Amino acid sequence: MAGPIEGLGADEALARLFLTPEGVADPAPLYRHLRSTAPVHRSATGAVFVTRYEDCARVLHDARFGKNPEGAEPGLVPEADDAARRFREEQRERLRAEHRAASMLFLDPPAHTRQRRLVARTFTPRRVERLRAGVAASARTMVGELAGTGGGDVLEVVGFPLPVAVIGTLVGVPGSDRPGFRALITAMAAGVEPGASLEELRRSEEASEEVERYFSELLALRRRQPADDLLSDLLAVEESGEALRDDEVVAVATLLFAAGFETTTNLIGNATVALLSHPDQWRRVREEPAIVARAVEELLRWDSPVQVDVRRALEAAEVAGERVAPGQAVVTLLGAANRDPARFSDPDRLDVGRDEGPPLSFAAGIHHCLGAPLARLEGQEYLRAAAEVLPDMRLVGSPPRRRRLALSGYSAVPVEVG
């Protein structure tokens, strides 16, 4: 971390957290500083930042806080790019003018309730669990490639191919089309970063439009030729006379496909770096197979693929004594909540045997990540395969971190084995 933290003002700490390579690469010291000096802070932009586990959980569960897609879009962090802020505002106006269906990620009840209820009828935990044997076989094959070549980039060999194969099969994206999504989804993900540049936002919008066009065309094909996949099921799902419109199916498919591998790719990369940087914990995973499910929870807590979630007040409310006006942003720093000593004992220690309840890595409340069971399953099967096939896996150098905090991960995780 560049520069001393002691005495740092909260706004300066937030700017360093979101807008500097050092802050993104190692946010834990800044999280500690904010929790101890300004656990609930109204920033210069007007957004309220919360860092304690209990405060974050209350906001995420409170029906007075939602996504408010029709509200204003102020910058969330100090020193935000004015051109980028204006682009976000213009983008929201364009979407409203075109009456395009919003992803349920950005909807409030009753629209969110209706869409999520219909999607949940097809994307069920039972359906996810039926994938386990196939995921385990794929994970074992992919880590076997690392063993066969003496190492490589975990993200290139497993972190991208595994989740994209799983979500691709589930949604119904042909195998030949899947490789082209990596750059598109990576570009899309940059658009959710509070500190995104104007160029990143433009590329994100272009990538989103390209992905939506793809799923619109695939949807038209599935109308003519239904298949055994989620896209066909979303077309057919109906409850009490209600069904999803075509533009809603496209929005849902885009969300599930993008979120289905972006967060899981980061989970696999982050978990690999965390474990190989803590040889005693990697040894426990190898020697105690029964601990894998708990290990994944701890790795999600330790270095969450999602560090930030934003809500907006739908009415006048209060957050830990701080008054919040309608439309005002409340930023829950999930990464800080996951290191809160009031919730987790010795939180800066990685302990794969920890059993102190779930972290907030998949958020909470009505917007709790629908794909969380699938991400957990893939993380578990990757760890099982890696522990058995790559017991002597070692990091090569210092893996480069992507300059992103909201969706946090590495750009490469090089390892050597054997």
Image (tube, rainbow, N blue to C red):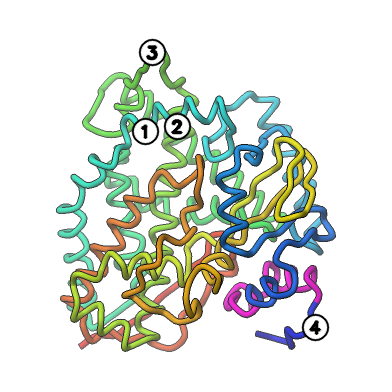
User: What is the magenta range?
Assistant: 9-29
Q: State the residue position of label 2.
A: 116
Q: CA distance from mark 2 to mark 4?
A: 45 Å
Of callouts 3 and 4, which one flags the residue occurring earlier in the amino acid sequence? 4
The residue indicated by pointer 4 is 7
Q: Residue 120: which disc?
A: 1
* Label 2 vs 3, first from the N-terminus: 2
Asked if the residue under mark 1 is in contact with the one under mark 3, i.e. CB atoms within 8 Å, the reply is no
Assign the magenta stretch its main secondary structure: helix
Q: CA distance from mark 4 to mark 1?
A: 48 Å
**Label 3 crowd bin: few (<14), some (14–19), many (20+), radius 10 Å:** few
Q: Nearer the viewer, mark 2 or mark 4?
A: 4
Q: Quadrant of the N terminus?
A: bottom right
- Looking at the image, is mark 4 or mark 1 earlier in the sequence? 4
Look at the numbered disc 2 and give the secondary structure of its residue. Answer: helix
Residue 401 image position (x, y, % from top left): 52, 74
Does residue 289 show up? Answer: yes
Query: Height in image: 83 above or below 400?
Result: above
